[in-house]
Amino acid sequence: MSTRTYNNTLRLKQTELTRQTIIEAALSLIAESPRDELSHEQIARRAGIGLRTVYRYFPERNQLLTEVWLEVDRRLQLSQYPDTEEKMLAAVNYVFNHFDQNADLIRGLLESDAGREMRERDNPRRRKGVERALEGVTVHLSEEERLRVVGIFQVLFGARAWETLRYRSHLAPGESAKAIEWAMKTLLAALRQQSTKATRGKTKRNS
């Protein structure tokens, strides 16, 4: 390896290390002090690097929040939301276990302005996944009814439901996932029953 190639490789590694240090500092601030505004100044102090360095890597707040949310996705391993009933049910235990493992960070994301901003940006992607997952059991519903059902499942398959069950209902780690999975299965069974009745009624009217 030439000296030039070695220096370029070293520089790239240092660049990635600094970038990751900034992101980790932002995540730790969200987890520890969710009520405080997440600023470049705070991040620089927490990361132990110069303020100019933080701005050089992330000149705009939007850029910073985008990268922080991508890191959250990586930790939760949820880069793609489930888009079928089967995948959604299978993902509950997996996702809620990751919530348990990153409890302080998840609560910080729920309580902080930065967390709310990031979650609102991601909401359309999440909602589309839920809509696709429920297509088979909501086809018989009116648009208003469908929207209500999608909204309920979006709440169930989310961090706020996990937080409520674990910290307000005092369920042990792992129990929240079981409760949510039961609720989803119960609702899905009721929706399938409604769909069957609606289909039979339509068949009778057309006969």
Image: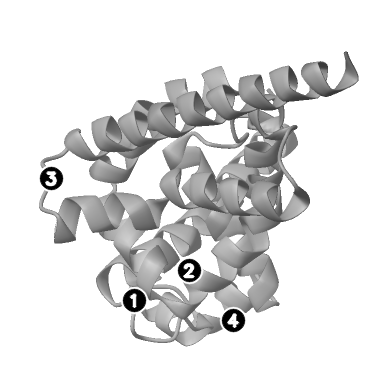
Identify the residue under disc 2: 115
Marked residue nearer the N-terminal end (4 or 2): 4
Identify the residue under disc 4: 52
Identify the residue under disc 1: 34
Q: Position of residue 5 (x, y in %)?
A: 72, 33
Identify the residue under disc 3: 171
Residue sitting at x 34%, y 76%: 34
Closer to us: 65 or 94: 94
Proximity of marks 4 and 3: CB atoms separated by less than 8 Å:
no
Residue sitting at x 16%, y 39%: 173
Horizontal arrangement in the rendering, residue 149 relative to residue 199 (left or right): left
User: Amino acid type of disc 1?
Assistant: Pro
User: Amino acid type of disc 2?
Assistant: Gly
Marked residue nearer the N-terminal end (2 or 1): 1
Foreground tag (4 vs 3): 3
Marked residue nearer the N-terminal end (3 or 1): 1
Q: Position of residue 78 (x, y in %)?
A: 53, 36
Marked residue nearer the N-terminal end (4 or 3): 4
